[in-house]
Image: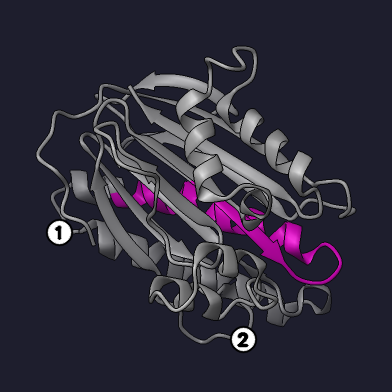
Amino acid sequence: MDVPRQVPAAKGLQWSGRTDRGKVRPNNEDAFVGLQFDAREVHYLGATGESPTDHLDFAFAVSDGMGGAMAGEHASRIALQKIMTLLPRSYRQAAAGLAVGFADVLDELFAQVHSALAHQGQSYEECLGMEATLSLCWFTPGCMYFGHVGDSRIYYLAAQGGTIRQLSHDDTHVGWLFRNGKIGEREARSHPRRNLLQKALGGGNQFITPQVGAVACEAGDIFLLCTDGLVEGLDDSHLEKFLLSAGSVRPGASPADWLVEESLARNACDNTTALVIRAV
């Protein structure tokens, strides 16, 4: 877990989201959501927008569902609906003075999503084996907390320089090989077992421990949440290039639109989702 840097907090957020089923799959099992909330109310955000952050918290998440028939679509939407209920409840607990840390909040949120998906999968034959990935960013003044399970991804591009950084860990054996330096990015991208998950919400797993962490959030920082379909078409260097130049090369397109369209142009097989958040 990163220790947040001691830097001035961002004053607002700009965001854009886009999902596409691709040119091969008959349905889209990806989903994304943006929320703004405080102790009293919660609101869904549009696919694009901008808002100050002085009095509200924000949450953004992507999920990739898996399962037969329409179970995958259902799984990703259940995961995101749970966020709308659970995060504001935790905010109210904190406002009431209860000792609730962000790690505890995210652990409980992921546990409840996992339980809901597992129960649904056991209760209905058409939902048997229902699973979902979930990658979540929770923005509070000066900080971004994140939670993650699966092979969707959270990227971070700091305003103060450096290269794009993947905050989340792919819950695959190939992801473990890459993180431990046993294979390179090119080998990981082409490995035949790269999409075989070792951990997902729902399914037959009894317990799930999410990856949680935090980074400071200052003006100019960029965060990207995406499903695995996006990175099938774009490697990390492409992602960094497009995030840094978005708005100047294609003024009419949102950063998320541009990323998804570029990925689909290179690899249109899978559902593809991008959610880009910039601190301003």
Give the number of the mark in front: 1 or 2: 2
Q: Can residue 213 be spotted in the picture?
A: yes
What element does badge 1 sit on?
loop
Instruction: Give the main secondary structure of the magenta stretch.
Output: helix
Q: Quadrant of residue 12?
A: top left
Q: Residue at x 86, y 67 (%)?
A: 69
Q: Quadrant of residue 204?
A: bottom right
- Toward the left, the furthest residue is 6
Which residue is label 2 attached to?
204
N-term-proximal mark, 1 vs 2: 1
Q: Residue at x 14, y 59 (%)?
A: 99
Instruction: State the extent of the magenta-drawn residues as a range.
Output: 61-90
Q: Quadrant of the C terminus?
A: top left
Q: Quadrant of residue 258?
A: top right
Q: Amino acid at mark 2?
A: Gly
Magenta region includes residue 66:
yes
Q: Is residue 5 above or below residue 214?
A: above
Label drawn at residue 99: 1
Cβ–Cβ under 8 Å for marks 1 and 2: no
In this orientation, which residue lies closer to the viewer: 252 or 116?
Answer: 252
Density class for disc 2 (Cα within 10 Å; few <14, some 14-19, many ≥20) is some
Where's residue 264, x and y in %?
Answer: 75, 42
What element does badge 2 sit on?
loop
Label drawn at residue 172: none
Q: Is residue 170 above or below residue 17?
A: below
Left or right placement of residue 101 versus residue 268 in this view: left
Q: How was the colour assigned to the protein in this rendering? A: one colour
